[in-house]
Amino acid sequence: MRRLLLLSLMPLSCLAAAPMAAAQDLDTTIADALAHAPALAAAKAEEAAAKARLDRARAESNPLLRAEGSVATGRIDNGGFFGITADDTTPLALQATAEMPLYAGGRISAAIDQARGGAKIAGFQAEQTRLQTVVRAISTYTEVLTARKLKIRFDQLVSELTEVERQAGLRFKAGEISSADLAQARARKAQADAGQARAQGRLASAEAAYQRLTGKPAGDLAPLPALPHTPPTLDEALDLARSSNPSMRQAKAAVDVARAGARAARAEGLPQVGAFAEAAHVRDQFFPGYKADSVAVGIRGKWTIFAGGRVATQTRAADAEVDASEARLRQADQTLTGMVIDAWTGLATTHRMVDATRLQNEAATEALRGRKLEAKVGSVPVLAVLDAEREAITAEAALLEAQGQNLVAAWQLNALTGNIDP
């Protein structure tokens, strides 16, 4: 029994042995999560598609070369017109056309700007997904470490209380303690069992989440690293977020896309002019033995003079979309400002929580040490030692939670400011 009680004096760093050389660290976990995340893979694929659409829009300004042809077999009977008798024919027609847009009223440039904005939006979405995945990986990593440490302590406490309950039963049978003392021992054992069950469930859930996120089981994990560098002031954090946050940059790009859409709508009412060159080779088309070869070079234009209000209504809709996108940009700025302020204050709060829970943990550890010394000389019962052990576990759990929340809060603030290097 004394040996079991002495075990609880050991610091947690001794209970959780030093990580093996092959232990996974946080950087490895983040890399695994990024490589395994389906949402990130989908975002990158959408970014690639958006870049392809940009290339497609740019290609509209390039020359276009078409070739068409047909060949068949048939019979032409002109009814003796011009003295041409009926005969079997093999109609053949070949045509090649080259076109080059000279003026499109701004349609092509507007389409390029829209596609460029779409590519930017897709890229910012991929970056936002990456940042979210990084924060999730850090949160999951800290949760696994915390759950493992808590399970070790509750396993130890249950082992101690199992022995205490057994000895209390023997002493009760011998008439040394009352039934109330036995009931207290059993109550503490049941409470420890409940805590152990919660710790086991929490650990199972954390490790399952880790495997879902990274595609690998959680092996030996290295201790939590130091906090990352964060913006030193709230104003700097807000300025950095407004310039670098992917969601904010998406909203800005959406405004550019909407403005390009408005230009495209207005361009529908303007003429289009292009240069062309055509060559044709025709045989047996109108009467047997017919031949025609032609070459033409020129300029072709098109202009819809009256569209029945189609262009005007389309322009009004595009202008309204510009207004809406600008409003969404203002809303994004307000939302981001609130989130950065919350993250900043949350980080400051977790800093204070770590300091407070560290003092609480040190005090609980010192109290437990004193109770153990008192129990050795018989001045307090063993149950008092176990109560102090329970309080020490609670204090240690609070410290572990605070340290994990502190790390996640720092990374969350950096994610909002776009300050996480790939």
Image (cartoon, rainbow, N blue to C red):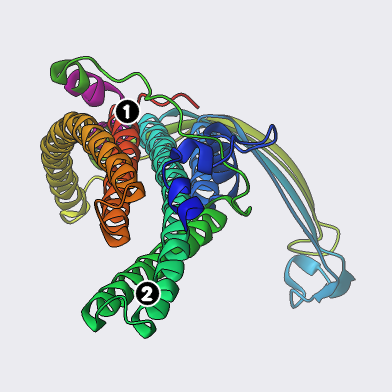
Amino acid type at circle 1 is Asn
**Residue 23 visible in image:** yes
Residue 263: x, y in percent?
25, 34
When the figure is inspected, residue 180 is found, relative to residue 237, above or below; the finding is below
The residue segment tinted magenta is 238-255
Instruction: Give whichever of 60, 34 is nearer the camera.
Output: 34
In the displayed structure image, the side of residue 99 where residue 145 appears, left or right: left
Instruction: Give whichever of 261, 295 is nearer the camera.
Output: 261
Label ID, residue 168: 2
Mark 1 or 2: the one toward you? 2
Number of other residues with Cα within 10 Å of mark 1, as a class: few under 14, some 14 to 19, many 20 or more: many
Determine whether label 1 and label 2 are within 8 Å by CB.
no
Alpha carbons under labels 1 and 2: distance apart: 54 Å
When the figure is inspected, residue 413 is found, relative to residue 302, above or below; the finding is above
Amino acid type at circle 2 is Ala
Give the main secondary structure, helix, strand or loop, of the magenta stretch: helix
Residue 240: x, y in percent?
25, 20
Tell me the residue at 45%/33% (across/down). 224
Instruction: Give whichever of 170, 43 is nearer the camera.
Output: 170
